[in-house]
Image (spheres, rainbow, N blue to C red):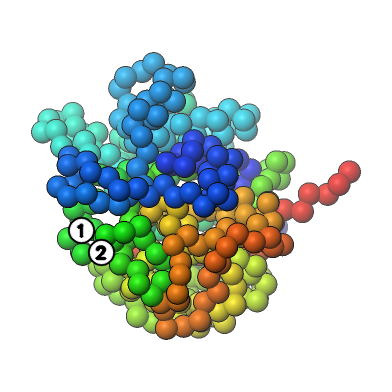
Amino acid sequence: MIREIYITETNCITPLGFDVESNVEAILRGESGIQLHGDVSLMPNSFYASIISTEKINSAFEKISTDKKYSRLEKMMILALEPIIKNSGVELNSKTAFILSTTKGNVTALKEDSEASFNNAHLDVLAKNVADFFGFKTQPIVVSNACVSGILVVSIAKRMIQSELYNNVFVVAGDEVSEFVLSGFNAFQAMSDLPCKPYSKNRTGVSLGEATAAVLVSAEAKDAKIKVIGDSSINDANHISGPSRTGEGLFRSIQNALKEAQIDPDKLDYISAHGTATPFNDEMEAIALSRLNLQNAPINSLKGFYGHTLGASGLLETVIAIESVNKNMLFESKGFDEIGVSETINVIEKNEEANINYFLKTASGFGGCNTAVVFEKVKHELH
């Protein structure tokens, strides 16, 4: 019998709030974290992005630790994990794993030309610093696979528990807006000069964002928020930064995840898509969904609220999607106006009540990676 897998705890740290509840309240009010920034240390000209106040991070962190040695991203990750580790009561023993997901990690450490800074930019050092804060007994695992990292960790955690290596896996995902990331996307001419508008006809590209999100993936059904029932990750190796024109990798990922979940595409009540608002990404997703006959499934991109938070996006968007399920509410795809893809997709234009039993989370990233995970609402029996 294959073990059933649940997500039992969730948390996130974003410009919209430092817990799940405040994030959902902001989304329901239609607030976006994307603002115009004029920080010349990040970029010479002003730019739109979703950035967390460093003062807020520091003051929240001081409440749990007086230690000065942590980087800004480490603090964000620790803040996301701390309440869920405490609430869960799970023992950090040899059957509890820790996975850290990030695209760029502490890349900002490289600004300072010293051996210590160079060392701190290594992803294993970031993972060890966060793991040691809590006292995990197992070796931390790092997942860094471009922009699918945040959702890929859920599927890796699921498989590790199903292989009976672990009973519980704490997962944290995070990235920050840095000069390195901004200059990279700017060099691709992919950055929008206005807040991003996924799937819209007059979109002008990506808005970048930063966040951390954390979940507990568990074999234990107690306190389950959602069940993880199918997953797949396929790399179509199309191009280093350009998505496949036929959506092949995403198409196969979704197909495999649905097959494992043993549900037909028409059973999906909601799709939390990647939706970066670049012409190539949005078009590729629309093509893949159309090939699977998913053009009627309600779909949103949360990038209009958070910007593209890189390695955090898949996990952050899963955390918010779980709230959609448990509140029976589909959240608007912020910034959307007029459809701007060649295939029909059913973009959610305003918050609406809906009964959601199954949802799909997808992500796609540089190098041709694509990940899809299918989730099912947990039916809590009334005693």
Q: Position of residue 351 (x, y in %)?
A: 60, 59
Alpha-carbon neighbours of circle 2 within 10 Å: few (<14), some, or many (≥20)?
some
Q: Check residue 186 in the rendering and tell me which mark sits there, or answer none.
A: 1
What is the three-letter code of the residue carrying label 2? Ala
Mark 1 and mark 2: Cα distance apart in space:
6 Å
**Residue 249 visible in the snapshot:** no
Q: Give the residue number, with chain letter if any, for mark 2.
A: 190
How many circles with numbers are drawn on the protein? 2
Q: Say if 201 sits above or below 110 in the image.
A: below
Asked if the residues shown at circle 1 and circle 2 are in contact, with their CB atoms under 8 angstroms apart, the answer is: yes
Q: Which of 263 and 14 is in front in this view?
A: 14
Q: Check residue 351 in the rendering and tell me which mark sits there, or answer none.
A: none
Q: Indicate left or right for 220 with 138 as reference.
A: right
Residue at the spot 72% in from the left edge and 62% down from the top edge: 355
Q: Say if 34 sits above or below 229 in the image.
A: above
Q: Where is residue 339 in the image (x, y as percent from the top left)?
A: 45, 76
Q: Which of 239 and 3 is in front in this view?
A: 239
Residue at the spot 72% in from the left edge and 53% down from the top edge: 378
Q: In which quarter of the image is residue 141?
A: top left
Per the image, label 1 sits on a secondary structure element best described as helix
Q: Where is residue 249 in the image (x, y as percent from the top left)?
A: 41, 73
Q: Nearer the viewer, residue 256 or 265?
A: 265
What is the three-letter code of the residue carrying label 1? Asn
Per the image, label 2 sits on a secondary structure element best described as loop
